[in-house]
Amino acid sequence: MTSGEPVRRGGRDAQRRRTRKAIIEAAVRLSAGGATPSIDEIAAAADVSRRTIYMHFPSLDHLLIDATAGAINDPPVEQALADPALAGDAAARVDALIQTLLEHSPQSLPLGRRLIRLTVDMPVNDTQEPPTPRRTQRRVGWLERACEPLRDTLSEESFQRLISALTIVVGWEAQIALRDVRGLDPQAEQETIRWAARVLVEAAIKEG
């Protein structure tokens, strides 16, 4: 892998997230009145093709569940990440993100379980292109924003590795493992996730 490849891949991933965000926002707007929009209506509102939507979401159900979860989480997460008191502290920003997500998990985790059931058995991609991620891109965007203060101190490769590591411990999959496999209560779950995320951020800072 050349040094330029992580940068190019990061740019492609950012474009995918922007497209995905536009699709989800269109679905949220069209669903606000209580009606279920069609794929064609969502595509028109997001100014993308039907094919583009299906590159990101295998089904309309998948898209609408993801959009609902986003409607629950997006406003409070945006507010947490905009806190000026945390502007230069990546560890504190990640911690604030985690606390916000877990605060809303009673509403969002049931949706997350449904979303995971819809996507756990993805079809095999026989092409040489890497598969397009079909969920959790919102999470990656949040983590990148939370870790933004480290952009100038970490290499692009180290920064992306940190985001990948945090993706493992921040999100529905981690909550489900801690609850269903480890049997943790919500308080212990929160303490474990916050501890794991802090250790990862501190390790990245030390290496950088």
Image: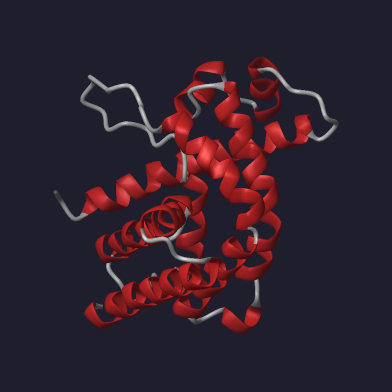
Quadrant of the image occupied by residue 119:
top left
Asked whether, in this view, residue 199 is left or right of residue 4, the answer is right
Residue at horizontal 45 percent and vertical 73 percent from the top: 194
Image quadrant of residue 66?
A: top right
Q: Quadrant of the C terminus?
A: bottom left
Seen at 44% across and 34% down, the residue is 134
* Camera-side residue of 151 and 99: 99
Residue 200 % position (x, y): 32, 72
In this picture, residue 64 sits left or right of residue 174? right
- Does residue 22 appear anywhere in the picture? no
Q: Position of residue 204 (x, y in %)?
A: 29, 74
Q: Nearer the viewer, residue 177 or 22?
A: 177
The residue furthest right is: 33
* Residue farthest to the front, as pictured: 183
Q: Is residue 110 above or below residue 104?
A: above
Image coords of residue 12 (percent x, y): 38, 41
Give how far across and how far down residue 158 sits, in percent: 26, 65
